Amino acid sequence: MDFRLDDSLVDAGIDTVVVGIAKHVDPQAVLPVAFLEKKQAMEQWALQCEVEEVAESAVVTGYTDLLQKVGRSVKKNPPTILALIRNIQHRGSLPQINSIIDIYNVECLKSFLAIGGHDLDKIEGPIEFTISQREDLFLPILSSEKHVAPTDPVYRDQKGVLAWLDVRDSDLYKFEETTKNALFVIQGNQETTVEMRLEALERIHKDLASCMPDLQFEKFLVTRNGVKPVS
């Protein structure tokens, strides 16, 4: 899988994208007790927290600053962590979807990071991280088609847009019950260090490995100079 970081996104403040590739995943894996306890603790925190306080954190401010910088409404396109907390508070619980998504949703609650998750086998590389620089269309999961403006940050493959504004993932690359291989993307913002994002990705790795014995996991840093594996 080839990755490219365009200068337009670097100019917007994102000079390194953290990527994970997980092979031999199992969306129906039984989550261990230790993870379920962590999930319950994060769910209780989300139910009791003040969304406004979370919105004022440095990580979330970094996302809102980027949205405002490209002229997008934060109210209409809230950072992932704010949308997830509001969903949990509305439902009264953290939605249970499948083991892969449950694991990175818990990590989102812990780190406040937006984490893209995609079925690797649906992707036709290379993947380009960029400001769109053209009109486009995007189909989010559980929503209707969206217009992509030339100023919107996206990442895309040869078929289309995988993620838009770092707040929505595409329905065309979503995880299915039959998913075998996964791609995780943490673009971050000017307030999120590479180390912080790698630590989040490593927690996802460990949680996946705890219930998927055949898992193979690789981490990469994508910069304007190329792709660097992380041991």
Image (cartoon, rainbow, N blue to C red):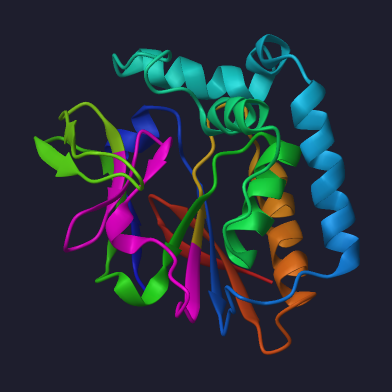
Query: Is residue 99 on the magenta stretch?
Result: no
Start-end of magenta stretch: 154-183
- Residue at (36%, 33%) from the top-left corner? 165
Please tell me in which quadrant of the rendered image residue 147 appears.
Answer: top left
On-image quarter of the N terminus: bottom left
Q: Position of residue 116 (x, y in %)?
A: 48, 51
- Residue at (51%, 24%) from the top-left corner? 63
Is 85 left, or right, of 78 in this rendering? right
On-image quarter of the C terminus: bottom right
- Residue at (60%, 25%) from the top-left corner? 86
Q: Position of residue 3 (x, y in %)?
A: 36, 62
Q: Is residue 86 above or below residue 71?
A: below
Q: Can residue 6 be seen?
A: no
Q: Position of residue 182 (x, y in %)?
A: 49, 70
Is 49 left, or right, of 79 in this rendering? right
Please tell me in which quadrant of the rendered image residue 127 appears.
Answer: bottom left
